[in-house]
Every structure is written in C-alpha cells, then in structure tokens.
Image: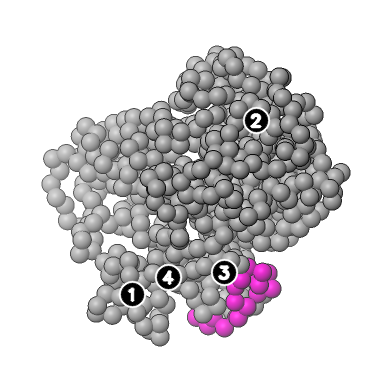
C-alpha cells in the first residue's frame, strides 16, 4: 500500500517553487508571516523525520501531539508520520484524572508540545492559567521524551529537544540521515489492528470516562482515504487556495497541489481577521459555531455602512457538528457568491456524505417542486460524490437531509436495532408511529408503505481501524461503523436523518455521551436523579443542559416544574467540574420536580425535557 505522504516528494519535483503553506500573522492577521514551497516542505519533513529517528523515535511509537496548525506544527506532524510514528490527540483541558487515564490508555513514548503550553502547565504561567479556570495537566512531568516548538520558556523540561523552524536542522547533535532514507516511510513495529504496509497513524480521544477512555484509531491507509474523500468536497485541485485552520481540509488541498493558507488565529478567536483572510480563497472548512461568528462579523460590517458587498471563499464546507438549513440560509444571504456545502461524518469515518445548501434548504421547506429542482441543480456537483443524479423525489424530505454518500462510502440501514418505543417517525411523529411499522415491530418492513428507517451503518476507505481499547485487547479491525443515527434513504439515494438511536449530544466538535456521566452526577449530595440533554441551537450546535431532581421528591405526573435558580441547581453547577470532563460540563443546570418517562421501557423522556428547558437555555427546539 502506498503511504499518502509519498505524494509530497512527487509534488516537490513537479512544482518545487509553488507555495504549499502560507501562514498569516501580525496585527489584524493580514501579514504573511511565513511561506513554504513544496520543495521546502518536502525537505523540512524529510530532515525532521531523520532527526526524530536519530533521537530514537521508533516505528510504531505514539507521540502525544499538542501543537497548533502552523508551518512548524504541520512539518512536525507529517515528520512523525514519515518516521513511522503515530500522532495522539488528547485534549489538555480535560479533568486531570481523565487526562491521566487517556495517557495511560494510549501509552505515548513521546510528547510534542509548544513551549508556551509547558510554561502554562508547569512554568511561571501556571498560576495565571489556574486563575482563569484552566486546570491544565503538568506536561513537563509526563514520563515521556519531550519535543517542543517555539522559543524556550521556563517550564520546558530538562532534556527536551527543540524542533527547529526554517532551514535549520531538527535539533543540535542530530545525526544526519541520507536523503533516500529520509523520504522513505520505514517499516513499523507490530501493533494490534494494523500491518507493516498499513501502520497506525492517528489516535483521537472522543469521549469516555476515567475507567473507560474512548479513542478512535486510524491507520495510514484510512487517514489517506479520509484525505481523498475530503478532496471530493468542493473538488480540490492544484493551484487553489484553501484558507482554514482545519488540517482535514488543509492537508487534502496541499496534497492536491494547492496552497494551504493558515489563519493567524482560529475563526472563533478572531473572526474579523478570518473574514479578511478567507475572502477570495477557493475553499474553506468551518464548524457551525465558527460560521455563526464569521457571519456575525460580516453582518456587523454591513450594518456599519460597509459599501462593498461581503466576499467569502468560492466554496465553504461546514461540518464536524449538525448543520442546519437555517444556518446555510443565513450564510447564503450574507455570502451569496459562496457555494455552501454541508458535510456529514464522524471521527470513525469522515467524511461520509455532503449536500449543497440549496438542496438542504429546499428539503427543509418540504416543497416537492423546490426539492426536485434543487436536486436537479446539484446533480452535477454531486455526481463525483457517487450520488444518484435523479430529480424524481416527489414529496420533499421529512427529517434532516445530510446528502448523498461520497464516492466509496457504503451505506446500510439496519432496521433490526430500532424499537417501536424508541424510534421517532421520519416526519417527527410520536414514537411508534413510523410509516411501515408492522405489528411485529419492524419499522419500515415494507418499503412500499414509507421510508425504511433504521440505524445508519457506514463503510468506506476512511473507516477507522477500530477503538483503541478493542485493538489493544486483540479484537479484529472494524468492518463498519454504526453511527447511532436513525435514518432512511430517499428515492434519490440521499441520506435523511430522523433522530438518534443513542442519547449522544454534540457541542462544538465534542461528542458527549450522557450515560457515561449521569451515574457520577447522581452521586452528588442532594441529587436523586440527573439527566443530560442537548438543546439545539439555530446554527446546529447544542447547549448541554443538566436536569437534576432533589432527594426526597415525590414521584410526579404530568409536566415537570423546572427552574434554574434553585439552591440545588447552583450547588450542582459548582460541583460538576469535579466529576465531569470539561468537555461535558453543562451550559446550564436546572432543577426539575421529576423526570418525565416515556415508552414501554419507561426511560427518561429526553425529548420532553428538551422542550421544557429550551426557554431557560435561551433558545427553542429546532
């Protein structure tokens, strides 16, 4: 199997002086701080990989990676992969206990970190970080070999080696390696779940608890498949500019022969600078929350009397969280010259499907004529994604249209896992009212009676190798990914989501599984029951609301009484940080008189709770 990084030396030969990386900085983020050509990038990656091997990095070594996307960080990430290592992403903002559990599960031999992070976790900036509520782990004390980027700062551990920028060598004292060896991906050491020609390349922790941290493992092959699928989104080509802080669009653009432009700050941190940088680019990728920040800035400029119409990228892909039609409609209104695309996928298999804004908006409106016309208009754009070009869908779409599967993605609808007391109907009906549900409980058993609803199951070239705990336990590689989303395919082969078979909440880019955390919350003083729900926001993001009931409360009937200003709600909010990963901390804690139940299994009625707490959370259910 050819490693995807083998494309880099070829690009260096074919287009040596073309800019591969462009990094912005300075006041307002408008100044170009650094440019790296394809020849320079290939040389720096090869030289850094040589230095890593000279320092003792072995094929199969896992490297805890905490470096922001900028040329220095991109070079180091690619060099680790070129040297045969595996990049491990662990959120340093998780609770110390969860961070330690994740480190123990991954077993990294190295840590690659910015000097600033060392200073903030074990140096003079530690007190400032703590005063701002950042309980960061002490990176300097991790029992690993340390690499750092940037200038040395107090807190960088003794013996750490700096990864030099520019044309300098990787580190003083490194023994050079012949160029032929530097450009060759070495044979990896054996590890469960992969082989010598498809080594482990990426470990991403997505959720889990201290007892059971959950991480997705990708190999060089599945990571290459992921980059190839992203290249289909917007049709990335040589000579184009991709302006994004997201590596999964930047790298495909770069490997297609384009220029990856890296903004000075993330869109969330400085949406104004991002708006200036992305104007006129060929493509970009944003999460929904960042789209909202970008549009806020552009609308504010227009309100202040901006004479010139707002300019965005030619193509803007939105994903990593649910994308609403309302957000795309707003985006199309503010940036009418931009082609808006909604991308669907999961860390386990990314990306999987996409849809044009016009098609998703028309589907949300439910008009047969508009949906059919939009399907026709987007047929050419989606043909490369393996979708059906038919415009024969005649009844609109009931549910959330996420689009046609990308080329190479396999789709299966598993109806066996959907119970009548749990599956929402495709038109938003009450549970148990799905079209096509027969007396035996098989939703959609007869396709002629309506859409066949079931759990969405995906396969494809970007399918993960598996979960870290499963692979380390010797289990076979994953054959498919069960998304937990309830879906059906319409007459055009498009995927339409109608609900979830699991209770997962998605906030930002973090997946939160309430069942992992609710038992801990029920152990807090004064709490009888605790239920976490996600309240949808207009941009597709969700607010996490924790509903608690007091000890000694009588079982209730009817609609619960809820309030956010109770003594119990305040006490739980103060204590939640002790028992939850920071990524799962609630945006709001409310007290309820009781938890409503639903279905034959008498489970908490999370849909009813969302409706009850939505006004308190500052929004209404979408």
**N-terminal label among 2 and 3:** 2
Which residue lies under the disc numbered 1?
A: 443
Within-10-Å neighbours for mark 2: few <14, some 14–19, many 20+: many
The image quadrant that residue 568 belongs to is top left
Viewer-nearest of discs 4 and 1: 4
Which residue lies under the disc numbered 2?
A: 52
- Give the secondary structure at mark 1: loop
Answer whether residue 534 is visible to the viewer in this image. Answer: no
Picture coordinates of residue 457 (x, y %)? 44, 64
Viewer-nearest of discs 2 and 4: 2
Which quadrant would the N terminus be assigned to in this image? bottom right
- How far apart marks 4 and 1 lie (CA) works out to 11 Å
Q: Which residues are magenta?
A: 378-395
Above or below 497: residue 110:
above
Residue 245 lies in magenta, yes or no?
A: no
The structure residue drawn at horizontal position 40% and vertical position 76%, both measured from the top left corner, is 452
- How far apart marks 4 and 3 lie (CA) works out to 14 Å
Q: Is residue 255 left or right of residue 509?
A: right
**N-terminal label among 3 and 1:** 3
Picture coordinates of residue 502 (x, y %)? 35, 57
Which residue lies under the disc numbered 3?
A: 404
Which quadrant would the C terminus be assigned to in this image? bottom left
- How far apart marks 1 and 2 lie (CA) works out to 55 Å
Within-10-Å neighbours for mark 1: few <14, some 14–19, many 20+: many
Q: Main secondary structure of the magenta part?
A: loop
């Amino acid at each position: 199997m050819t490693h995807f990084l083998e494309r880099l030396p070829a690009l260096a030969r074919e287009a040596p002086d073309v800019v591969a990386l462009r990094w912005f900085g300075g006041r307002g983020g408008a100044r170009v701080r650094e440019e790296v050509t394809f020849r320079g990038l290939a040389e720096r990656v090869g030289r850094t990989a040589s230095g890593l091997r000279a320092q003792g990095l072995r094929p199969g070594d896992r490297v805890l990676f905490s470096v922001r996307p900028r040329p220095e960080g991109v070079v180091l990430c690619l060099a680790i992969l070129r040297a045969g290592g595996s990049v491990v992403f662990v959120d340093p903002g998780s609770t110390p206990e969860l961070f330690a559990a994740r480190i123990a599960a991954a077993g990294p031999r190295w840590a690659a970190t910015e000097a600033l992070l060392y200073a903030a976790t074990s140096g003079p900036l530690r007190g400032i970080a703590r005063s701002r509520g950042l309980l960061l782990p002490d990176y300097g004390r991790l029992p690993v070999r340390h690499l750092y980027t940037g200038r040395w700062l107090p807190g960088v551990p003794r013996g750490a080696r700096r990864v030099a920028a520019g044309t300098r060598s990787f580190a003083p004292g490194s023994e050079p390696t012949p160029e032929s060896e530097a450009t060759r991906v070495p044979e990896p050491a054996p590890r469960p779940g992969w082989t010598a020609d498809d080594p482990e390349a990426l470990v991403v922790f997505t959720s889990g608890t201290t007892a059971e941290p959950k991480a997705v493992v990708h190999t060089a092959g599945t990571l290459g498949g992921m980059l190839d699928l992203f290249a289909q989104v917007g049709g990335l080509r040589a000579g184009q500019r991709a302006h994004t802080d997201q590596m999964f669009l930047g790298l495909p653009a770069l490997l297609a022969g384009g220029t990856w432009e890296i903004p000075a700050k993330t869109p969330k941190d400085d949406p104004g600078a991002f708006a200036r940088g992305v104007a006129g680019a060929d493509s970009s990728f944003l999460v929904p929350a960042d789209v909202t920040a970008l549009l806020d800035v552009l609308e504010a400029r227009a309100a202040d009397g901006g004479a010139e119409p707002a300019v965005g990228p030619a193509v803007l892909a939105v994903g990593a969280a649910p994308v609403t039609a309302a957000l795309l409609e707003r985006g199309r209104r503010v940036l009418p010259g931009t082609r808006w695309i909604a991308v669907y996928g999961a860390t386990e298999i990314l990306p999987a499907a996409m849809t044009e804004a016009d098609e998703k908006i028309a589907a949300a409106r439910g008009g047969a004529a508009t949906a059919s016309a939009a399907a026709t208009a987007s047929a050419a754009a989606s043909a490369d994604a393996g979708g059906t070009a038919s415009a024969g869908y005649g009844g609109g779409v009931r549910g959330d249209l996420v689009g046609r599967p990308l080329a190479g993605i396999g789709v299966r609808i598993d109806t066996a896992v959907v119970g009548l007391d749990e599956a929402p109907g495709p038109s938003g009906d009450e549970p148990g009212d799905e079209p096509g549900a027969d007396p035996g409980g098989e939703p959609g058993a007869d396709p002629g009676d309506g859409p066949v609803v079931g759990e969405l199951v995906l396969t494809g070239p970007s399918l993960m190798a598996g979960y870290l705990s499963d692979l380390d336990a010797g289990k076979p590689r994953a054959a498919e990914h069960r998304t937990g989303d309830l879906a059906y395919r319409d007459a055009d082969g498009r995927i339409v989501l109608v609900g979830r078979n699991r209770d997962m909440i998605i906030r930002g880019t973090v997946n939160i599984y309430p069942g992992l955390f609710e038992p801990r919350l029920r152990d807090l003083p004064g709490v009888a029951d605790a239920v976490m729900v996600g309240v949808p926001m207009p941009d597709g993001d969700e607010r996490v609301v924790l509903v608690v009931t007091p000890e000694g409360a009588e079982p209730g009937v009817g609609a619960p009484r809820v309030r956010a200003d109770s003594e119990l709600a305040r006490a739980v909010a103060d204590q939640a940080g002790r028992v939850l990963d920071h990524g799962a901390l609630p945006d709001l804690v409310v007290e309820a008189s009781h938890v409503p139940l639903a279905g034959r299994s008498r489970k908490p009625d999370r849909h009813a709770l969302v409706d009850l707490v939505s006004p308190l959370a500052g929004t209404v259910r979408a």
